[in-house]
Image (cartoon, rainbow, N blue to C red):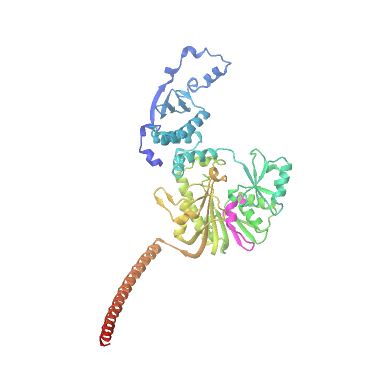
């Protein structure tokens, strides 16, 4: 059931019923001075919203009128008692179980009322805007949305990337274990990742960090670099490189040979990239500070491989960036327009046969599949399957939009499913410098349709002539056979 379907059903149940109450009706003047001032109960009564007089009249906005659950400016109430966070969490779990029971046991409770209540709790408890929760409900169903919100609200384990220019992963793990740091080897698809389970470990202050033995970097951000399959003689560009984790990884894969270009618009962040490179002993990195939207004016040569980790809304890293929980759809769409320009610029800078990897730490369709679908129509590029088999396929149908079936070759990585930070990856190969317009496409389609029509006509003419010829041959054969039968019968009679 989509969010739009719910909007049209049972508006009365969707926390929009309002009542008001007067504080004086529920406040007993006789008991005002009877509480023990030193007791906890007396203290709680003092700081209660009613005794503080925050508002003379407050609106009751009902979430579930049957069970007397409502909210106001202070919080959420059930039977006039303020619900704590633990109570709201228990209520969400109960409603999710109830959704299953309504299917199995045919309980006569409408799903829309349960879903509306859950969506309110998701907004209130996890501190998202209503607009963002509504948006996420288009991508996930109600149960998966709970998992997404819950897992992304928890403290996340720390990931390190070993600097193989200075040390091996095994040796680094031994050193960290000797310092009582609980470490775990990364997955088999990479040979540099280390996981630290203790969230409170301050890995940025260790001497090994200052020596440049490792960098703090999520496992998801290793994937776009590995998908480029960088060779030592490749000319490589990291188009939006700050804070420098990916471009320094490129340098280590090239074993400090050749050249890697790292570009970013922010001068301070460019200095951070230089600091990381210096600490890690990297000397094949060239840092440029150019606006990637106008990069073609400054770089006139082309690259073999390009990584575009585009600036995005950050809706995939909401555990680190809580401001992303309140992003508006307008902000997301504005970013998507810039991302289209950036990807088009990246393809201009790419050699024919070169590879560009597009990635974001966003889960919005506008910033991911919609950008790739746009570039497939505009440029002569093709999507390639990813080498690392982690993640869900790209979304090919979103609301009323139908994208190219090739979009399924993209990868969507989710923290609650794959235990890696939320990420999007698309791998493109450039076939030529051609740029398509709508007119070109329409003319190409018309030509294709004409060619198909001509082929059908030719087939029809050929079939007609061929059938006439067959009929003629068969007819002559029949006459000849009849003639031979007559001759044969005559000879028999003579004998």
Residue 212 visible from this viewpoint: no
Q: Residue at x 56, y 58 (%)?
A: 306
Residue 160 spot, x, y in % from top left: 65, 47
Residue 179 spot, x, y in % from top left: 73, 41
Number of on-image labels: 0
Would residue 332 appear left or right of 201 to someone viewing this image?
A: left
Which of the pair 259/291 is nearer the observer? 259
> What are the residue bounds of the magenta stretch?
222-245
Which of the pair 135/464 is nearer the observer? 464
Q: Is residue 250 above or below residue 351?
A: above
Residue 371 spot, x, y in % from top left: 47, 53
Residue 36 spot, x, y in % from top left: 56, 14
Q: Is residue 435 magenta?
A: no
Q: Quadrant of the N terminus?
A: top left
Q: Quadrant of the C terminus?
A: bottom left
Would residue 208 appear left or right of 318 to someone viewing this image?
A: right
Residue 144 visible from this viewpoint: yes
Which of the pair 179/209 is nearer the observer? 179
Q: Residue furthest bottom?
A: 494
Would residue 490 appear left or right of 274 to someone viewing this image?
A: left
Q: Is residue 93 above or below residue 476?
A: above
Which of the pair 179/346 is nearer the observer? 179
Q: Is residue 229 magenta?
A: yes
């Amino acid at each position: 059931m989509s969010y739009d379907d719910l909007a049209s059903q049972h508006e009365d149940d969707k926390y929009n019923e309002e009542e008001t109450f007067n504080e004086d009706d529920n406040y007993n003047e006789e008991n005002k001075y009877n509480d023990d001032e030193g007791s906890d109960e007396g203290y709680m009564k003092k700081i209660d919203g009613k005794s503080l007089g925050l508002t003379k009249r407050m609106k009751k906005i009902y979430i579930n009128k049957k069970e007397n659950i409502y909210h106001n400016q202070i919080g959420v109430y059930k039977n006039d008692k303020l619900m704590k966070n633990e109570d709201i969490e228990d209520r969400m779990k109960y409603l999710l179980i109830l959704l299953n029971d309504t299917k199995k046991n045919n309980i006569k409770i409408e799903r829309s009322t349960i879903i509306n209540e859950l969506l309110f709790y998701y907004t209130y408890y996890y501190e998202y805007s209503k607009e963002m929760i509504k948006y996420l409900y288009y991508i996930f169903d109600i149960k998966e949305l709970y998992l997404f919100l819950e897992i992304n609200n928890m403290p996340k384990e720390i990931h390190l990337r070993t600097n193989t220019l200075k040390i091996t992963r095994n040796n680094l793990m031994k050193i960290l274990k000797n310092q009582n740091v609980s470490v775990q080897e990364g997955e088999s698809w990479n040979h540099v990742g280390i996981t630290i389970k203790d969230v409170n470990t301050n890995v940025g202050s260790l001497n090994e960090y200052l020596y440049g033995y490792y960098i703090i970097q999520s496992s998801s951000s290793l994937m776009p670099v590995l998908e480029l399959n960088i060779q030592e003689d490749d000319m490589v560009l990291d188009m939006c490189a700050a804070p420098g984790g990916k471009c320094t990884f490129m340098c280590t894969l090239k074993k400090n040979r050749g050249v890697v270009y790292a570009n970013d618009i922010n001068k301070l962040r460019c200095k951070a990239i230089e600091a990381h490179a210096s600490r890690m002993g990297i000397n094949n990195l060239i840092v440029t500070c150019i606006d990637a939207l106008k990069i073609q004016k400054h770089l006139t040569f082309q690259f073999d491989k390009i990584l575009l980790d585009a600036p995005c809304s950050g809706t995939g890293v909401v555990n680190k960036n809580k401001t992303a929980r309140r992003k508006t759809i307008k902000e997301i769409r504005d970013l998507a327009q810039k991302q289209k320009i950036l990807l088009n610029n990246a393809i201009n800078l790419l050699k024919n046969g070169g590879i560009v990897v597009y990635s974001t730490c966003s889960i919005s369709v506008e910033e991911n599949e919609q950008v790739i679908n746009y570039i497939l129509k505009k440029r002569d590029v093709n999507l390639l399957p990813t080498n690392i088999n982690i993640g869900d396929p790209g979304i090919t149908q979103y609301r009323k939009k139908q994208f190219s079936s090739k979009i399924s070759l993209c990868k969507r990585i989710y923290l609650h499913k794959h235990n890696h930070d939320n990420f999007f990856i698309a791998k493109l190969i450039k076939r030529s410098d051609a740029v398509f317009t709508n007119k070109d496409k329409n003319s190409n389609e018309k030509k294709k349709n004409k060619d198909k029509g001509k082929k059908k006509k030719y087939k029809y003419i050929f079939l007609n002539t061929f059938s006439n010829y067959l009929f003629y041959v068969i007819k002559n054969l029949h006459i000849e056979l009849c003639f031979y039968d007559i001759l044969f019968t005559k000879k028999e009679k003579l004998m």
